[in-house]
């Protein structure tokens, strides 16, 4: 009861739009759990081989590179509610393409327009949430959003896996009904969310402001920005190599069936929920970087265990560590706090543009490694990049953003 009262007090002092973002995230995350671990398997069933899968992801990154800067600027100069509404509509279209796909070309089209969702909806959401939370609440508030979403979404993966088995197993026929369920749910959720959101007009700007001048202002507005761009670019390489293939690897290399794949999402979610509150409190009290360094070993253990797992049951243990590594929002919080509040949309556009440049070749390289006889390298190479390059950059070149006076009172 004490925990519920503290949660109610926390929510009461936040904005209405923050609470609506909790609703959007919880609903969308639950619906995403219907399909998230089957996307690569579904696309492979529609005719795409591993190299094609990687190339498709690269195409999406290329589009993201083209639109990130202008969309980041749009997020700072237009009503965020309207920007988010356009992003919601694009995501619904993306899911519809998956649901009705006749071959992998439909998925390619979906992946090429999906960056518009990231650029418009998710970026607007991040700015809306970040601006609406106090410094001492920011990591906890961002973490709470995902914890609530994960808790509600826990009920989805195993029933989804049972539906897959009922409809035909890990085949296009067995997976397609999940995409139709997700499509219907997203249409209902997004209509409700958009109608309930309050308008978020842009901050006042000088009459002489322009697109290029705005971008220059962002880069002059904080310390460690170039180093953080480097961290983001390397991160695009790491996750660009892993993301398109992780569940495909679990199914094809380690022999995981639909129920096991559902269990991976479930155990990861449960673990993330259990660790989220204490780790995000560490980020709000001890510093964003302290929390990042604390959980990084869990990410590396996940990568190693996935490669070394002698069978599918060991993957469940591996995904426990993946859940720990996903439980803190210190990384996102640190990146947003490097610039003033009024620059965050453009800053996200800048980092996304540079990251997309590096994410274009990464999935192709991952596909070649996967197809080349040593698929475990899609985890081991990213581990070396993260440990050897990203973490030293954060440690020595990126400043801590939590104000010490705020930390002491948190």
Image: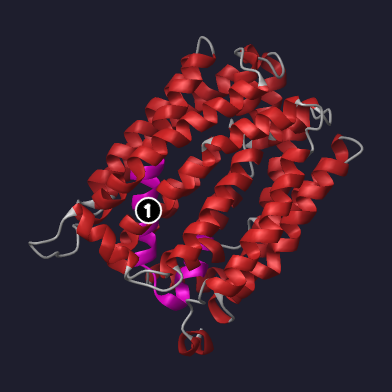
Residue that extends furthest to the left in the rendered view of this protein: 207
Q: Residue furthest right?
A: 310
The picture places residue 194, in percent across and down from the top left corner, at: 29, 43
Image mark count = 1
Q: Dot 1, crowdedness within 10 Å: few (<14), some or many (≥20)? A: many
Q: Is residue 150 above or below residue 46?
A: below
The residue at which mark 1 appears reads as: 350
Q: Position of residue 139 (x, y in %)?
A: 51, 68
Task: Determine which quarter of the picture holds residue 255.
Answer: top right
Give the residues drawn in magenta, as a range.
Answer: 118-144
> Which residue is nearer to you in this view: 240 or 38?
240
Residue at point 77% right, 28% down?
A: 251
Query: Magenta span has 327?
Result: no
How far across and how far down the image is residue 247, in percent?
70, 33
Picture layout, residue 247 above or below residue 171: below
User: Camera-side residue: 141 or 159?
Assistant: 141
Q: Write the residue at 32% across / 48% down.
A: 69
Asked whether the viewer can see residue 285, the reply is yes
Front-lying residue, 127 or 401: 401
Verify whether residue 122 appears in magenta.
yes
Q: Mark yes or no: residue 189 visible.
A: no
Determine the residue located farthest toward the top in the rendered image. Answer: 102
Q: Position of residue 300 (x, y in %)?
A: 75, 55
Quarter that holds the N terminus: bottom right
Left or right of 73, for residue 354: right
């Amino acid at each position: 009861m004490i925990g519920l009262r503290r949660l109610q007090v926390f929510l009461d002092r936040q904005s209405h739009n923050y609470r609506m973002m909790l609703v959007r995230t919880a609903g969308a995350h639950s619906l995403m759990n219907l399909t998230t671990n089957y996307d690569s398997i579904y696309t492979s069933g529609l005719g795409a081989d591993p190299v094609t899968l990687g190339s498709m992801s690269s195409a999406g990154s290329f589009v993201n590179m083209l639109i990130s800067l202008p969309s980041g600027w749009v997020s700072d100069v237009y009503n965020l509610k309207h920007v988010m509404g356009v992003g919601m509509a694009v995501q619904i279209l993306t899911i519809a393409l998956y649901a009705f796909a006749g071959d992998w070309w439909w998925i390619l089209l979906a992946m090429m327009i999906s960056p518009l969702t990231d650029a418009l909806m998710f970026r607007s959401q991040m700015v809306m949430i970040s601006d609406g939370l106090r410094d001492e609440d920011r990591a906890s508030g961002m973490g709470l959003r995902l914890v609530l979403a994960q808790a509600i979404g826990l009920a989805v993966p195993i029933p989804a896996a049972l539906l897959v088995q009922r409809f035909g197993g890990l085949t296009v026929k067995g997976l397609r009904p999940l995409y139709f369920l997700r499509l219907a749910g997203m249409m209902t959720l997004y209509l409700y969310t958009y109608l309930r959101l309050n308008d978020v007009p842009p901050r006042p700007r000088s009459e002489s402001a322009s697109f290029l001048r705005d971008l220059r202002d962002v880069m002059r507005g904080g310390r460690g920005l170039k180093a953080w761009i480097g961290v983001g670019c390397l991160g695009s390489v790491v996750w660009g190599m892993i993301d398109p293939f992780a569940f495909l690897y679990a199914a094809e290399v380690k022999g995981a069936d639909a129920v096991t794949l559902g269990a991976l999402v479930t155990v990861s979610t449960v673990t993330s929920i259990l660790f989220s509150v204490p780790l995000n409190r560490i980020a709000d009290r001890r510093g964003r970087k302290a929390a990042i360094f604390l959980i990084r070993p869990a990410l590396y253990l996940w990568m190693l265990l996935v490669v070394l797992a002698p069978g599918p049951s060991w993957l469940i243990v591996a995904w426990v560590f993946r859940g720990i590594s996903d439980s803190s929002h210190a990384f996102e919080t640190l990146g947003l706090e490097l610039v003033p509040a009024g620059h965050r949309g453009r800053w996200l556009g800048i980092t996304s543009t540079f990251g997309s440049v590096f994410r274009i070749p990464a999935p192709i390289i991952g596909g070649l490694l996967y197809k080349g006889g040593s698929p475990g390298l899609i985890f081991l190479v990213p581990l070396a990049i993260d440990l050897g390059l990203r973490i030293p950059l954060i440690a020595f070149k990126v400043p801590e953003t939590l104000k010490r006076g705020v930390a002491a009172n948190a």
